[in-house]
Image (cartoon, grey):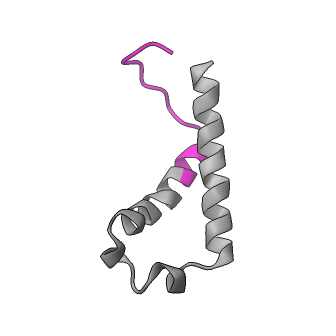
């Protein structure tokens, strides 16, 4: 991939980035959560976030090859 070339992400990558964005804000600014993080997050939330992180990471790895 050349520097400066814009690459459009696939829909699943874009969806995952949008899903993870609010979680980033809460992790960076804990006061943004509507409670303590351990009270707000459930196992399903964590699992979905990890799956999305993996989707994005795999896409980036493919771009770097």
Residue drawn 61% across the image and 71% down it: 45
Q: 47 above or below 43?
A: above
Residue 31 sits inside the magenta stretch:
no
Residue drawn 41% across the image and 18% down it: 5
* Magenta extent: 1-16
Q: Residue 64 sits in which quadrant?
A: top right
Residue 11 sits inside the magenta stretch:
yes
Q: Position of residue 29 (x, y in %)?
A: 32, 68
Q: Position of residue 34 (x, y in %)?
A: 39, 85
- Mark count: 0
Is 49 left or right of 37, judged from the image as shown?
right
Residue drawn 51% across the image and 15% down it: 1
Q: 12 above or below 32?
A: above
Q: 27 above or below 35?
A: above
Magenta span dominant secondary structure: loop
Q: Position of residue 57 (x, y in %)?
A: 60, 40
Residue farthest to the top?
A: 2
In the image, 63 versus 12, the foreground residue is 63
Is 18 left or right of 44, judged from the image as shown?
left
Is 56 left or right of 8, judged from the image as shown?
right
In the image, 53 versus 36, the foreground residue is 36
Quarter of the C terminus within the rendering: top right
Q: 46 above or below 36?
A: above
């Amino acid at each position: 991939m050349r520097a400066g070339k814009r690459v459009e992400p696939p829909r699943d990558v874009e969806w995952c980035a949008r899903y993870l964005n609010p979680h980033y804000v809460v992790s960076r600014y804990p006061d943004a959560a509507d409670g303590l993080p351990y009270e707000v997050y459930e196992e399903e939330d964590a699992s979905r976030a990890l799956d999305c992180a993996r989707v994005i990471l795999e896409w980036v790895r493919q771009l770097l090859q």
